[in-house]
Amino acid sequence: MLGGKRIPDRLYDQAELFVCHIKNKQWPEAKRCYDAVRDELCSMQADEEVMTEFFGERGERGVILKEGLFREEYVQKAYYEVAVRKEGRCRGRKDERRQKKQRISGNLCAGLRLYTEQIRLKILYRIQPGKSRKTGP
């Protein structure tokens, strides 16, 4: 069992970085920070005090008695955004609008290419002034 004195400073840095990622809505990075610290503390077999410092303390029936460096609501939000909403990008109206705009812009580009091709052909086959174009025998 490791006490609080032997915990590396980088784990505390990860906790601060976790909060920064949450504030910037970088959900996968936040989840990665949390998972890295949790795995590291479990592998080091940290004692109860250290675990409470990082993750908080719960009472009976799941009541939060003390918040840790990783706030429970932030951890749940990060997990929700990554697991359920697929890295914060939900397939909703915004996504549908963006796809529709891409289709429209693609159609506009195709239409513009067709129009410029028609103009090019008109210029290519334009009748030169002073010369008549014979259309038959």
Image (cartoon, grey):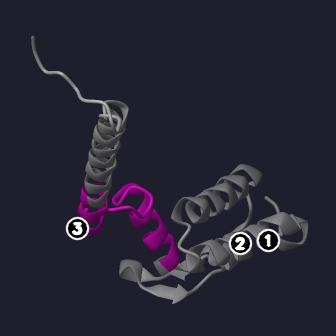
Q: Residue at x 78, y 66 (%)?
A: 11
Q: Residue at x 67, y 70 (%)?
A: 51
Please identify the residue farthest to the front as the structure is shown.
130
Q: What's the residue type where badge 1 is placed? A: Asp
Taking the magenta stretch, the answer to whether it contains residue 89 is yes
Q: Which residues are magenta?
A: 74-100
Instruction: From the image, tell me which residue sits under label 1.
Output: 13
Q: Nearer the viewer, residue 91 or 110?
A: 110
Please name the predominant secondary structure of the magenta segment in the image: helix
Q: Nearer the viewer, residue 37 or 47?
A: 37
Instruction: From the image, tell me which residue sits under label 3.
Output: 93
Q: Nearer the viewer, residue 61 or 84?
A: 84
Q: From the viewer's perspective, is 118 left or right of 136? A: right
The reply to whether callout 1 and callout 2 are in contact (CB within 8 Å) is yes
Q: What's the residue type where badge 3 is placed? A: Arg
Quadrant where the N terminus sits is: bottom right
Looking at the image, is 57 positioned above or below residue 48?
below
Residue 84, by quadrant, is bottom left
Instruction: From the image, tell me which residue sits under label 2.
Output: 17
Residue 34, by quadrant, is bottom right
Please identify the residue farthest to the top as the structure is shown.
137
Q: What's the residue type where badge 2 is placed? A: Leu
Q: Is residue 7 visible?
A: no
Give me the C-alpha separation between circle 2 and circle 3: 32 Å
